[in-house]
Every structure is written in structure tokens, then in C-alpha cells.
Image: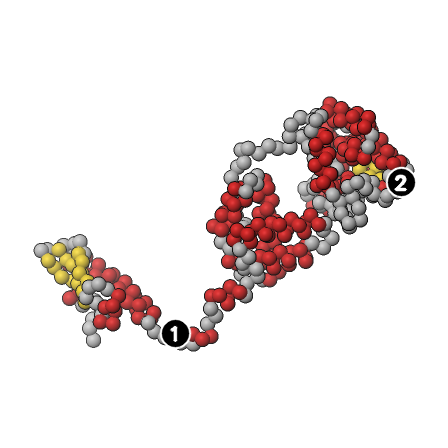
Amino acid sequence: MRKKFAPEYVMNRDGVYYYVRHIPYDLIAYYNVSRLCFSLKTKSASVAVRASKSINQRLEDYWLGLRLQNMDIPAIQVVKSSDSAVDDGLLLSEACELYLRLKGVGKDKVFIRTANRNTSYVTKLLGDRPISSYSSNEAAQFRDWCIDKGMGIKTVKRVFSSIRAIVNLAIAEEGLDCSNAFAKTYFPNDDNAQSRQPISIQDIKRVQSLCKDIDDEMRWLITLISDTGMRLGEAAGLLKEDIKLDDCIPHIDLKPHPWRSLKTKGSHRCIPLVGATLWASKRLLEANNDSIFAFPRYCDAASCKANSASGGLNKWLHQYVPDNCVIHSFRHSLRDRLRAVECPSDIVDAIGGWKTSGVGHGYGNGYPLEVLEKWMRRL
């Protein structure tokens, strides 16, 4: 039996050692020559022997691989093909259906439409594939595609947040052994982004005065939002019975309805009515005698058309407020106005429905209306 590292694999020519070896007959078809011969770039015999052993081992491993390629694989008929393995995965569209089935209960049409739309964005670019087959590189491609479509960075982040939630839930529910390709995508800074600006108290008073002069449903809605900080959808989806004018402290009992859910659990709250908001509440209750809805123009038993309302309201409002100010800016202003009167932050959160950090804030029923009204009257 030939020794594995035979001396004939090393040859000396003019003082320099070379590696020399004939290619095995069964592998000659893979080469253009019948013999390997190349310099080991050394004049030391011991170095040449060590180098030849290393080269020989690598060649033996390589040749073994070539030989195995030509062998019949035992029991190949029971091995799944790559296509069938992929087919067993949960498609992204199926993950979206699972997400809506579990998370969409009680949610409005916007929630369902958003999940389906964001999923369709991914499938349009990358295809409807098993969630385990998407790569982080493809997620980066999807990010760039969204930006190229004209989406702002904040919008792209919201799209990714939705897709991440869909994939994460599918992985957890199905017990899949894969990572979420959309979990760690980098987002560049958006230097052109324009943040929503709060509206000054002078402009708020001016808008409220104009609303009283015009005195119609659109202006009642604007006025109601201006001093309560409610989200547009929250206000537009109110029932008349949610407005409690006959109580000791007039207030709005803001709660979810089938046609309009609330953004968070903390959004379910009572908001005292003072000043211009009290006027708007009285006017809409006096006028809308034939409907159970506070704003029937924007709401019915099927849906709350907050997006439709936003266009018309902002178009009118833009004439009287600074640039980059919209209906939602009243919500930003409320927080600044409460800060200005040194209102404690947890009371600010209670009035606006913002989440207050800390486990203790989840206990009890929250602040009584008397306390909230005290601070609202200081605005």
C-alpha cells in the first residue's frame, strides 16, 4: 500500500522544490492535464514536505467530493425535493390571514385594509412565498422599493411594523424555526420630513371664533377636537349618548363602538367639556335630532369615515393656521397647553389617552372627573 504522503510528490529543480503528482485515471476528465506540477516556492526540504502534505490532503478531499458526485445516492427516493420542502411553508398571504383571524377581531376596516395592503406590497415585489424564504437582503430591497414609490421614512417604518407583526405572529403560532427577515432592516434618516406642529393658543381661539360664526357640523367637529385633544376618528365616531351634558360635570364618555374602535386600551376615557367644546357639544345635540350619531355626515352603523373627514376639515383649517398644522395638531397643542399650566404628566396622559409608563398606573379606575375638569379649566 502506497504511503499517503510519498516522497515522489516533491521534486527539486535548481534548488527549488515542486509539488508533482499524476491525476488519478478516474478523474482525468476533470482536468486539462494529466499531471500536476507547480512550485512550492521554497528551498527548504522540511518546509516543502509540510507544504506537500497539506496540498495532498486538500486534493484528496477534493477528489473524494468529485467521486461522490458520480455515485448513486442511497435511498434518494425518500428525500424531499427542495420544491416540496418550500411548498410546506406558510405563505405570507396565509400569515396575513392568520394575523387577521387572531388580531382582527373587533378591529375596524382600516386595520384589516392596512394589513392586506402592506402584505400586497411585499408580494408584489418579492412574490407570495413562505415567510421562512425571505432574506434580510430582500427586506432591504423592499425598503428601497417603498422609498422609490414616494413613501416617507415614517410611512415605510409603519409598513415594516405591520409586516413584522404579521410574520412574528405566524412564527409563534406555527412553531416555525426561522427568523423574521423584516425584523432588523435599517432605515435612513429622513432629512426632508416635516413634523406636525402644534397650533398656538391665539390661532386656536381664532379658529374657535370662526367656527361659532359658521356654526355647522364641520365646525362643531373642529371645535370639539380643539379643546379635548381627541383624535379625529374618536370624535367623528361618537354617539349622541356618549356626550353627557346633563351630568354634574359635562363630559364625553369615549369608548369603542362596532363602527369605530379605539387605538389603545388607554384611549377609553372620560373627557370634561369646558369652554368652546361645551358650546359645540350643545349645538350638535340640538341639531341632530333624527340620528343617534353625533356626526352623521361622517359616521354610520357600518363605518366611521375619518379619512374622508380629514380631507375636508384640513382644507378649511389650512387657511387659518400655520404651515404643517393639521387637525391632529390640536392634539399636540393640548399636551403643550397642559404643560404650560404645570399639569402633572399622568393627568395629561389621562386626558389625552396617552399611555403612562409604570406598572402602578394600570391599577384602579384612574382620576375622577373633578380632578380632570380642574386642569381642563386652566387651559
2 vs 1, front mark? 2
The span from disc 2 to disc 1 (Cα, nearest Å) is 82 Å
* Quadrant in which the N terminus is drawn: bottom left
Which residue occupies 12% across, 59% down? 12
Q: Quick check: 65 above or below 233?
A: below
Q: Quick check: 183 above or below 62?
A: above
- Read off the residue under disc 1: 73
Left or right of 75? Residue 162 is right
Q: Quick check: 132 above or below 297?
A: below
Answer whether residue 249 is visible to the viewer in this image.
no
Image quadrant assignment for residue 272: top right
Element type at mark 1: loop
**In x, y percent, where is residue 52?**
21, 61
Element type at mark 2: loop
**In x, y percent, where is residue 221?**
78, 35
Q: Nearer the viewer, residue 265 or 257?
A: 257
- Read off the residue under disc 2: 289
Left or right of 316? Residue 373 is right
Q: Identify the mark at residue 246; answer none if there is no mark.
A: none
Answer whether residue 309 is visible to the viewer in this image.
yes
Image quadrant assignment for residue 157: top right
Which residue occupies 14% across, 58% down? 17
Which residue occupies 86% across, 39% down? 288
Q: Nearer the viewer, residue 314 or 54?
A: 314
**In x, y percent, where is residue 254?**
79, 42
Which residue occupies 63% across, 52% down? 116
Q: Nearer the viewer, residue 48 or 326?
A: 326
